Image (spheres, helix red, strand yellow):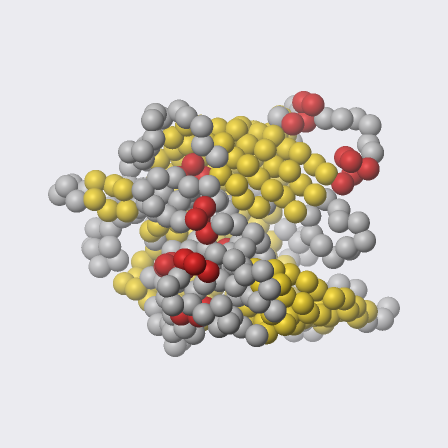
Amino acid sequence: TRYELFARPDVWYNGYDGFKAGLNVNGNYMNYKHIIDVTLWFNMGIAQNYLNRFEHVSPQAFDIASYRASYRTATDKFMKGSSIYLSAKSLDGLRAYVLGFDRKDISGKNKIYMFFKSMYRKGFDDLPYLLNPMEWQINAFNNTLNTGIEHSYTYKNGSGNINLGLRSTALMSDYNYQSISMNTINRTRIGKLTLNTRVILQYGSGNNWASESSLFLAGANPEELMENKYTRAQGFFDPEWAKIGAQTNYFQHGGGLNLRGYAGYLAPQSTTNGAIVYTYKGQTGAALNAELEFSSLFRIKKQNWITNTFKIVTYVFGDAGIINYNTPTDEVLKMSDVRADAGLGVAFTIKKFGVLQTVNPLTIRFDFPFFLNKIPPTDKGYVQYRFVIGVNRAF
C-alpha cells in the first residue's frame, strides 16, 4: 500500500565510452502509478574499441556523462484504463524524447496508443558509437507522430498479436515521410512442436526519408537497434559484422522484413532500363517469416538448476519478402524480386542472473540460412554454409 523506491549501482560498456559507471533509481506504486526509472552514468573511456574505422575521431571526444529517464502513470480519473508516459535520454550519441498516451479496454486484449518521438544526433563525434554510422545523419531532427491499435487474441492451440500503426513526420522535423504498417505474430502448438509465424506489410510515402527509420530488408533498422542495450552501440558486436556490402554478413537483429539470410547484403536489383539499384532498405514491403521449434521433442523432464537457469530452443526457419526500389520522387511503385531464405537456428537463453534481480533474460541466437534464392556473386551456390548472430529471437 506504499510507494516503493529502489536504488542500485549500474555498470555498462560500449566501444566509445568504454566502461560506464553509474546509479539507477526506480520506483512505483503497485507497478501501476508513478513508475519511474532513471539511470545516470559517468563514462570513463577505459577499454575503447573499434575507433580505427574513423580517420578524424578523437578518443577523448566521447560524452562525459549519459542518462536515461522514463516515467509512466495511470490516468484512470481521465479515462478508465489509460496511461501517460514520457522518456528522455542522452545515450550513445543520441538525444531522444518520447511523450505518449495509451488506453487498454477492460479485457486487456485491445490497446490504442499515440506518441510523439524526437531523435537528434548533434555532430560527427556521435557517430563512432554506431554499428552502422553511414545510416544516420547529423544535425537533423527526426520528429514523428505515431498512432496505432494493438489486439491480442487466443485460438485453439495458440495465441497471436496484431498491430496496425500509422507514422508521420511531425512539427520541426527535418524529414518528410509517412507510413502505414501491419505486423501480425502467431504462435501455434502442433503436438510437441511450436509454429511461430509473422506477417508484415508496410506502405510508405514521402520525399525525404530518414535512413535510420527506413524499412530494412534483412532486419531491424538503426532506430530499432537503439532500443536494445546490446545493439545501440558498438562494443558487444564487431562493426565489421554489421557492415553492408557486396556479400552477406554475420550480424542480424530481428525487425524490418526480417530476411535474416540477407544480413549485411546490398541486395542489388536490375531495373527495366538495365540499371542496378540496392534494395537492402526501402519504404514499402511485405514479408512472411516462419519458425518451427522442435526442441520440445528432446525436453528434459527432470528439472534442476541448469534447466531453471538456461534454456535452449532449436528450430527450422524460412523467410520470404519483397521491398520497393523506386526513389521517393517516382510516381510509380516498383517492387523487387522475391527473396527467400531457409535454414536451422538455435537460441540460447540465460533466464536468471543470480542476485542480479533486475537483469532481464538474455537470448543469444545463431541462425544458419543455408539456402538463399538470390545469392551474392561471391557465393558458391544457393545452398552453402552461412550463419548470423544476434540477441533476442528474430520475432
* Residue that sits furthest to the right in the current view: 1
Residue at coordinates 68% horizontally, 62% vertically from top-left? 11
Residue at coordinates 53% horizontally, 47% vertically from top-left? 162
Q: Quadrant of residue 264?
A: top left
Q: Quadrant of the N terminus?
A: bottom right
106 relative to 322 in the view: left or right: right
* Residue that sits furthest to the bottom in the current view: 172
Foreground: 150 or 326?
Answer: 326
Residue at coordinates 45% horizontally, 46% vertically from top-left? 241
Foreground: 299 or 285?
Answer: 299
Residue 153 at x, y percent in the picture: 61, 43
Q: Quadrant of residue 365?
A: top right
329 relative to 103 in the view: left or right: left
Asked if residue 307 can be seen in this view, the reply is yes
Q: Quadrant of residue 87?
A: bottom right
Asked if residue 179 can be seen in this view, the reply is no
Residue 52 at x, y percent in the picture: 43, 58
Foreground: 285 or 307?
Answer: 307
* Residue that sits furthest to the left in the current view: 273
Count of numbered tags: 0
337 relative to 355 in the view: left or right: left
Residue 133 at x, y percent in the picture: 41, 60
351 relative to 219 in the view: left or right: right
Q: Is residue 131 above or below residue 289?
A: below
Q: Quadrant of the C terminus?
A: top right
Residue 361 at x, y percent in the picture: 69, 48
